[in-house]
Image (cartoon, grey):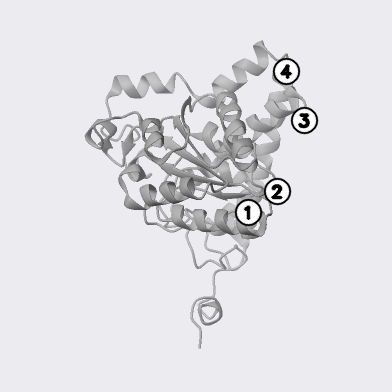
Amino acid sequence: MSSQALSLELYSKMLMSRKYEERANALFKGKAFGEKPLSGIGQEAVGAGAVACLEARDFVAPSLRSKAAFFAKGFTPQDCFLQLFRRRESLSRGLWTAHHMGDMRRGVILSSALVASVLPVAAGVALASQLQGTGAVTMAFFGDGACSRADTHTTMNLAAVRALPMVFICENNLYALSTPIQDQMKNPHIADRAAGYGMPGVTVDGQDVFAVYEAAQKAVRRARDGGGPTLLVCETYRYRGHTETHDPIDGRPEAEYQRWLMRDPIALARERMLSVEGISSSTLSQIEVRIDTEIEQAVRYAWQAEDADATDLEQLVYAG
C-alpha cells in the first residue's frame, strides 16, 4: 500500500468512527434507543492506527471506547446501528449491547462489561494461535483504569512467560470514569510496568494516527516473529463525558480539556495529508460525503429492521 493510500485509509476509519458516534449520540438524545453511548470521540487514532497493522487472520479484543478498531477490522455502520437498535438482524440478534460487539469470523473477540475481563480471553485466543501455528497476532485494547485490575497483570505475565503473539494497547485517556491517573497509580508512566513482565513498553502520542501505526507495526512484527508481546501505551483524551448523560467536560479541568481539543486526531491527520503528502482537500471532502451517506443509509436500514425476538433466547442463551 502506498503512503497516500495508507493515509487515506487511516483517515477514513477515524472519520467513520467519529461520524458514527456523533450520529449515535444524537439519536440517543432524540430517544431513538435506550442504550447509553460511551463515546470514544477524540481517541479514534488509537484504534484506527493500531488495527491497520493487522491481517485478516489476526484478532482484536476492543475496549469500551475503541470503536475505530471495529471499523478498521471490517465492521460497517450498518453492523453497529443494527446492534445499537437491538434488531434481530444484528450480530447478537439484539440480545447484546453495542458496546461489546464481536464477530470471530472477522477476528473481533466478544467482550463483557467488566473492565479488563476480555484480556484473559484474548490471551487464550493468542495461545490457541500459537499452539496451532497459524501465525495470527492478537491485539488487546484496555484503558488506563484497567491497569489496576488483576486481570491485566496476570494476562501480561502469562503472555510474556509464554511469548504469546500479542500486542497490548493501553488507551490512556488520563481518567478512569472520573478518577484522574495520578489518583490511580504512583507512577503514571504505564509503559514502565512492561519491564516487570519482561516485555517492551512503548509510549506514543495517541492523537497522531501515523505514530500509532508505526509503533504498532513494530509490535505486531515482533509478535508474529515469535518475539512475544509488547505493551503500547497511547496517550489520548476523550472529548465527551463518561456517557452521553454526563456533561462533555465531566468535571475535568477546563484548560486541560481545551488543550486536548487543539490536538484533535482527525484534524492533525488532515493537516499532514494536505501539507506534507499533497492530498487535495477535494479528495478528503469526497471521503466525508461518502461516509455521511453510508451513515445515513445505515440508520435508515436499522430503523426499519425487525426488533429482537425473545424466542431467540432459547436457542442462543439457554441450553437444554
Task: Assign a secondary structure to mark 1.
Answer: loop
> Residue 227 versus residue 113: which sits nearer the camera?
227
Q: Residue 81's x, y, as percent?
A: 57, 53
Is the Cβ of the residue at disc 4 closer than 8 Å to that at disc 3? no
Question: What amino acid type is highlighted by mark number 4?
Answer: Ile
The residue tagged 3 is 1
Q: Which of marks 1 and 4 is in front?
A: 1
Q: Which disc number belongs to residue 56?
A: 2
Give the residue displayed 25% in from the left and 31% down from the top. Answer: 182
- State the separation of the CA atoms marked 2 and 4: 28 Å
For label 4, count other residues whose C-alpha is less than 10 Å away and answer few (under 14), some (14-19) or many (20+).
some
- Going from the N terminus, do you reach mark 1 or mark 4 first? 1
Is the Cβ of the residue at disc 3 closer than 8 Å to that at disc 1? no
Judge whether 56 appears above or below 306 on screen: above
- State the separation of the CA atoms marked 1 and 2: 7 Å
Question: What amino acid type is highlighted by mark number 3?
Answer: Met
For label 2, count other residues whose C-alpha is less than 10 Å away and answer few (under 14), some (14-19) or many (20+).
few
- Going from the N terminus, do you reach mark 3 or mark 2 first? 3
Is the Cβ of the residue at disc 3 closer than 8 Å to that at disc 2? no
> Residue 56 versus residue 303: which sits nearer the camera?
56
- Going from the N terminus, do you reach mark 4 or mark 3 first? 3
Is the Cβ of the residue at disc 1 closer than 8 Å to that at disc 2? yes
For label 1, count other residues whose C-alpha is less than 10 Å away and answer few (under 14), some (14-19) or many (20+).
many
> Residue 17 versus residue 207: which sits nearer the camera?
207
What quarter of the picture does the N terminus occupy? top right
Q: Residue 302's x, y, as percent?
A: 61, 57
The residue tagged 4 is 279
Judge whether 19 appears above or below 118 on screen: above
The residue tagged 1 is 107
- State the separation of the CA atoms marked 3 and 1: 22 Å
